[in-house]
Image: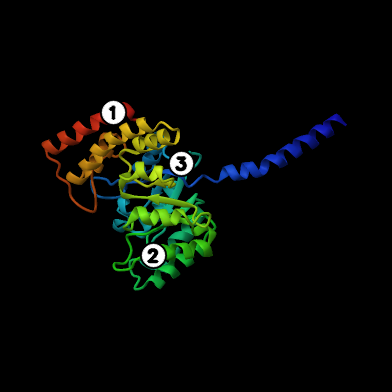
Amino acid sequence: MRNTRREFLATLGASALAPRALAAAAKPMRGIFIIMATPYTAAKAVDFEDLAAEVRFLDKCGVHGIVWPQLASEYSQLTMEERIHGMEVLAGAAKGRRPALVLGVQGPNTDAALAYARHAEKLAPDALIAIPPTEAKTLEDFRQYYRALARSTTRPLFIQTTGGAKGITPAVSFLLDLAREFPNCGYVKEEFQPVISRMKELSSARPSVKSVFSGAGGRGMMYEMRLGFDGTMPGAPYADIHAQIWDLYQAGRREQARDLFSRLLLMLECEQQIPGTRQYLMKKRGVFKTTVSRQREFDLDAKAIAEIDFNFEALLPYLRA
């Protein structure tokens, strides 16, 4: 009798906790979501070993999400086979780790994007993201592309507003229409100018709009956090710094967040002045074996390296990995 009662109570307790467990299983689409870099061998083949190592590095950095492949990942330089295999590598490397995994499924047209989305679905990522189609001719082409992707999954689907066909403006009203039609489509990475006013308009449309992120290397993150936006998607070299700035600010330690952000700005300025800074730092930090890029050749001379190293020294006490 006592055993039966205990079993009943245990079952009842488990039933009460089940919804909470299911809710906890969904990782929040909020915080620092890093656009992963793509590593290459000296012969310019994708280095999938380093791609997996990058996941471990970003986990140690304390980021909230990882995203691949996007513009900063040189996705346009990758073959379909490389993208598919890279997704599989990331799904394996990210399993059991804290960061949410967001897989990029963009393609030049709807059919190509759906092929990536179908494969991504098999890997059970936490979310998908898609740059607009580059072969589109009208905003209606954009609409049909995202509608098809939204129908293909129940996972959160981020719409990135830039990087698609030239001359087509994804108006905020267009984004809101998609978010209202498809509940999983209320996630936006906003980079289209004027960014702040568009992000404000999107954010005012909650709960249809669920997450509003920025890009641009996280340069605007201090003001964006004050405005209550959901996160930013910067590059990988300073992932631990971005994560700490976010965590400090959310904990109410705004002066510390500001001071660390000012140090980060030195490196973001280096990136503007010295092409190859990101690749150099990914090797310097022991994540990648090379500084190779398929997109362009870098020739860092002694003065360029000295400037990068000088500014990076300001971040050394704050590195987590």
Circle 1 SS class = helix
At 43% from the left and 47% from the top, the residue drawn is: 229
Asked if the residue under mark 2 is in contact with the one under mark 3, i.e. CB atoms within 8 Å, the reply is: no
Asked if the residue under mark 3 is in contact with the one under mark 1, i.e. CB atoms within 8 Å, the reply is: no
Percent coordinates x, y for residue 230 in the rendering: 44, 46
Earlier-in-chain disc, 3 versus 2? 3
Percent coordinates x, y for residue 273 in the rendering: 17, 45
Q: CA distance from mark 1 to mark 3?
A: 23 Å
Examine the rendered structure and indicate whether residue 29 appears above or below residue 321. below
Earlier-in-chain disc, 1 versus 2? 2
> Which residue is disc 3 drawn over?
99
Percent coordinates x, y for residue 30 in the rendering: 46, 45
> Which residue is disc 1 drawn over?
316
Which residue occupies the foreground of this view, 294 or 233? 233
Please name the amino acid that badge 2 sits on: Ala
Please name the amino acid that badge 1 sits on: Leu
Q: Quadrant of residue 290?
A: top left
Examine the rendered structure and indicate whether residue 91 appears above or below residue 284. below
> Which residue is disc 2 drawn over?
171
Percent coordinates x, y for residue 101 in the rendering: 45, 47
User: Can residue 215 be spotted in the picture?
Assistant: yes
Earlier-in-chain disc, 1 versus 3? 3
- Count the labels in the image: 3
Q: CA distance from mark 1 to mark 2?
A: 41 Å
Circle 2 SS class = loop
Quadrant for the N terminus in the image: top right
Examine the rendered structure and indicate whether residue 91 appears above or below residue 158. above
Circle 3 SS class = loop
